Amino acid sequence: MDKNLFQRLTTSELDSYTDEIEHAVENHAHWLNNINRSLLCHTPPDAADLAAEPHLHCHFGRWYHGIDHPSLLRLPEFETIGPLHEAMHKTAHSLLAAQQRGQPFDPATYEQLLQLSDELRHKLGQLRSGFKHNMNLVSLLMGKVFENAAEGVLITDPNGVILSVNHAFTEFTGYEANEAIGNTPALLRSGRQSEAFYRHMWLTLQNEGQWEGEIWNRRKDGKHYLEWLTISGVRDESGTITHYVAVFSDITTEKENEERLYHLAHYDLLTDLPNRMLFYDRLRQGLLRARRNKRQVAVMFLDLDGFKQVNDELGHPAGDELLRQVARRLSGVLRASDTVARFGGDEFTISAPDLAPDEDISRVAQKIIEAVAKPYYLGSNRVQVTTSVGISLFPRHGDDPDTLITHADMAMYETKKGGKNSYRFFTP
């Protein structure tokens, strides 16, 4: 590996070594977020956090315990960080282990974890400041930073031919150094990105000297993974690019967790329809567009007629299955731009945005009523329910989500009183 290359990269980007400490701060903030998710949302913890010595398995721990430079080891800030970092991980370990055993959450231990995390972040900041004034130490330790980085790193020549990779690259991709060196990063292409994507990437690199973003790549065993990739051009004294340095990390699991948490927060667990929160958000967006474009938005409030009888006679599992089937039927008769949500119990709401000012929504309401009224098969039982629908229109019956939903709800109750299995528009 060309160690001078990493020295130049250090100088050009506020020292990649001080960036390593910056990353440690960010990494632990991200780590603490994951711990919070595991403790508060009961998502599965990372296996490393339940290991016997969890402080040795994180990004910073691998770097910290791999340092053997005497000048660094004598720095007071460096000495105090080790025990502090270990105590923080072990405190998190005890909380996670207690949760795994089904023990109650301990606020005092959690508070101790937060205090240790704050103190570690403060000490890392002090250490970072010290590095800014010790460039000799930075350059001497460049090789260890490269090899012990938790992220995969590869260095190429100006034509994209791989010159060097680190150990994490092999762990992530499955390719040994001798298999990667001499190839280009096309070795990892998944086929999920178009040629236009790669043309834009290299155009950005040429114009701005750096590109970063999400990209799907392929491991040696053929499995695809999502990574966050940063590519930087390294220039010599004349400004000519001599190398490219790519740094990446696998974010597949993180992305899946984010999507799962988003889905849990915005979708109904039983029917998988949008919940109230997402319905309100989409309705607000539809109203904003309608104001700009002078269009109409319809809001419908639906309540099933006869649902309680099904629930009482056949039991809750049958009632739940009925709600799932109703949800599928409602989704099937609406446009892709419409939103149907489970509002609660056997109540559903629908927003139909971007309607012409004179467009009649009655047709849609009638289709919904007919779809819901068809027989349902719940195991060996054949049942029928109907629906009562109330409708309000923007801007005629209100100009905000709460007013429109309330007015549609009031119209639905008038439908119930008038004989059910029909629809009514809101009237003052």
Image (cartoon, grey):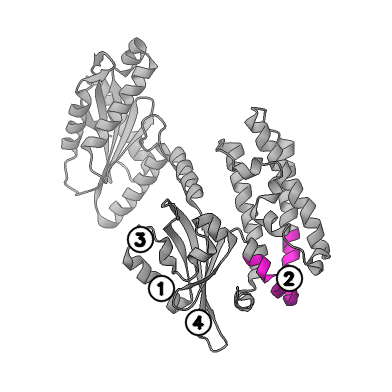
Q: Which residue is mark 1?
A: 202
Q: Residues within 10 Å of mark 1 (few under 14, many from 20)?
A: some
The answer to whether 68 is drawn above or below residue 237 in the figure is above
Which mark is first along the chain, 1 or 3? 3
Q: Residues within 10 Å of mark 2 (few under 14, many from 20)?
A: some
Magenta span: 123-146
Task: Find residue 36 and report its image quarter.
Answer: top right
Which mark is first along the chain, 1 or 4? 1
* SS type, badge 4: strand
Q: Give the Cα distance between marks 3 and 1.
A: 14 Å
Q: Give the Cα distance between marks 3 and 4.
A: 26 Å
For residue 41: magenta?
A: no
Q: Which residue is mark 3?
A: 193
Q: Position of residue 257 (x, y in %)?
A: 49, 44
Q: Which residue is mark 4?
A: 241
Amino acid type, callout 2: Phe
Which mark is first along the chain, 4 or 3? 3
Which mark is first along the chain, 2 or 1? 2
Residue 131 is labelled as 2
Could you tell me which residue is drawn at 70 percent across and 49 percent down?
Answer: 55
Could you tell me which residue is drawn at 26 percent across and 56 percent down?
Answer: 293
Residue 273, can we see it?
yes
For residue 140: magenta?
A: yes
Instruction: Tell me if label 4 and label 2 are in contact, CB under 8 Å.
Output: no
* SS type, badge 1: helix
Q: Is residue 383 left or right of residue 142?
A: left
Which mark is first along the chain, 2 or 4? 2
Of 359 and 260, the residue lying toward us: 260
Q: Give the Cα distance between marks 4 and 1.
A: 13 Å
Q: Position of residue 25 (x, y in %)?
A: 66, 58
Most extreme residue toward the front, as rendered? 178
Q: Give the Cα distance between marks 2 and 3.
A: 40 Å
